[in-house]
């Protein structure tokens, strides 16, 4: 079995075991299931090419956008992961404004150390 297929199977098994638990990612990589740790980590929005990231009321593309987050903004991860519509979603809260809170797709999030 190829290493990448094996790694995908292991990651998928961990995802199933941890589904519904509050976990976040560690490492200099987008938020995926690769490295897991308890909630309370920080994520920075990256890779939107200046378009911004729709932060939604619920995980998934059908969740109502509640505000736009922009590259370099930092958020505290408080819930997730949740899988919906082909993305992994994390619940983020701005540390400076609790009203700026909602679900974001992991494709545009990068783990950062606590500011």
Image: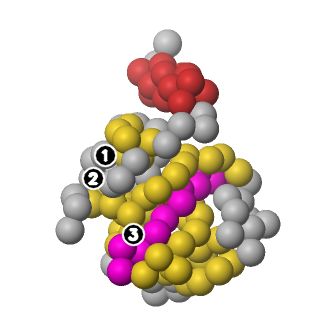
> What residue is shown with label 2?
28
Chief secondary structure of the magenta span? strand
Indicate how the structure is coloured in the image.
secondary structure
Query: How far is the residue under mark 3 from the one under mark 1?
Result: 14 Å
Q: 84 above or below 51? A: above
Residue 95 in the image: state x and y as whole percent.
36, 73
Q: Viewed as shown, does residue 36 lie left or right of 85?
A: left
Q: Is residue 55 above or below residue 84?
A: below
Query: CA–CA distance between discs 3 and 2?
Result: 16 Å
Residue 73 lies left or right of residue 11; in this view the side is: left
Residue 92 colored magenta?
A: yes
Q: Residues within 10 Å of mark 3 (few under 14, many from 20)?
A: many
Per the image, the residue denoted by label 3 is 75
Alpha-carbon neighbours of circle 1 within 10 Å: few (<14), some, or many (≥20)? many
Q: Residue at x 49, y 65 (%)?
A: 92
What residue is rendered at 43% in x and 51% in y?
A: 31
In this rendering, the label closer to the viewer, 3 or 2: 3
Q: Quadrant of the C terminus?
A: bottom left
Q: CA distance from mark 2 to mark 1?
A: 7 Å
Tag 3 near tag 1, CB within 8 Å: no
First in sequence, mark 3 or 1: give its number. Answer: 1
What are the residue bounds of the magenta stretch? 86-96
Pick whichever, 47 or 36, lies toward us.
Answer: 36
Where residue 3 sits: x, y (%)?
Answer: 42, 21
Label 2 crowd bin: few (<14), some (14–19), many (20+), radius 10 Å: few
Image vertical order of residue 77 relative to residue 36, above or below: below
Which residue: 47% across, 76% down?
98
Task: Specify whether residue 46 is in view.
Answer: no
Residue lying at the far front in this picture: please name it. Answer: 98
Task: List the residue tagged with mark 1.
Answer: 26
């Amino acid at each position: 079995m190829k290493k990448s297929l094996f790694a995908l199977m292991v990651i998928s098994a961990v995802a199933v075991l941890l589904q519904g638990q509050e976990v976040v990612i560690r490492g200099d990589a987008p938020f995926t299931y690769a490295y897991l740790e308890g909630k309370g980590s920080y994520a920075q929005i990256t890779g939107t090419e200046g378009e911004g990231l729709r932060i939604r009321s619920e995980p998934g593309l059908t969740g109502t956008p509640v505000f736009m987050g922009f590259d370099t903004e930092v958020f505290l991860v408080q819930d997730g992961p949740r899988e919906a519509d082909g993305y992994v979603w994390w619940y983020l809260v701005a540390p400076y404004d609790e009203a700026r809170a909602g679900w974001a797709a992991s494709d545009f999030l990068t783990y950062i150390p606590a500011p």
